[in-house]
Image: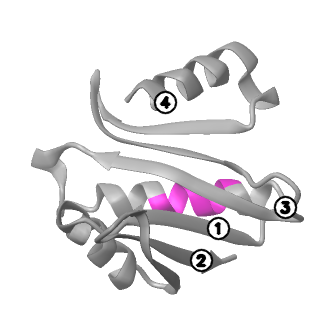
Amino acid sequence: MDTIRELWTEFVNKGEASWYHFIAARRGDEILGFGCYGQRALTEGTWDFYWMGVAQNMQGKGIGKLLMEFVKASVKARGGRLLLIETAGKEEFEPTRQFYLRYPGCELEARIRDFYAVGDDLYVFTVRL
C-alpha cells in the first residue's frame, strides 16, 4: 500500500507529466475499483498495468473488465501497442490469474518460477493493442 500511495502522490502532484496514471470506478463517492498504469521506460509503445484492485463485494460484477477496457483505450490513445501485466504465483492471487486468463486478448506470456520467493512465481500477461 505504501508504494501505491507514493505513486498516487506523484500522479496528483505531476498530473500528465507523471509516469503513472490512475483511474477509479466509482458509484457516487464509493470507489469500487482502481487501476494504476504507465509507460515502460526504454520501450516504444509498451505500457505496464501495475495494479488493479476491485472491492471484494464488487468482484465478479464487471468492474475489472471495465477498468481493463478503459486502460486499453487510454494506452492506445497515447500510442501504446503492448500492455504488460505482472502478478504473483501465491495461492491468494489465483483469482487474479484466472481473471487475466479469461480476459479476451490477454495471454500468459511468461512464468518465472520462484521469482519473488521459493514457491512464489512471477506471471507475465500481455495484451496487444
Residue that mark 1 sits on: 83
Return the residue found at the far front: 118
Q: Nearer the viewer, residue 67 or 94?
A: 94
Q: Earlier in the sequence, mark 3 or mark 4?
A: 4
Q: Position of residue 57 (x, y in %)?
A: 10, 46
Q: Which residue is mark 3?
A: 79
**In this figure, which residue is indicated by the disc labeled 2?**
127
Circles 2, 3 touching at the beta carbon (< 8 Å): no
Q: Would residue 91 appear left or right of 101 to someone viewing this image?
A: left
Task: Estimate the spatial distance between the alpha carbons at disc 2 and disc 4, rounded to whole Å.
Answer: 24 Å
Bounds of the magenta segment: 68-74
Residue found farthest to the top: 13
Q: Quadrant of residue 121?
A: bottom left
Q: Tell me the number on the disc at residue 110.
A: none
The image quadrant that residue 21 belongs to is top right
| Vertical position of residue 20 compared to residue 59: above or below | above
* Tag 4 near tag 1, CB within 8 Å: no
Residue 22 image point, x, y percent: 55, 36
Per the model, the C-alpha gap separating discs 2 and 3 is 14 Å
**Residue type, label 2:** Val
How dense is the environment of label 1, judged by Cα within 10 Å: few (below 14), some, or many (20 and up)?
Answer: many
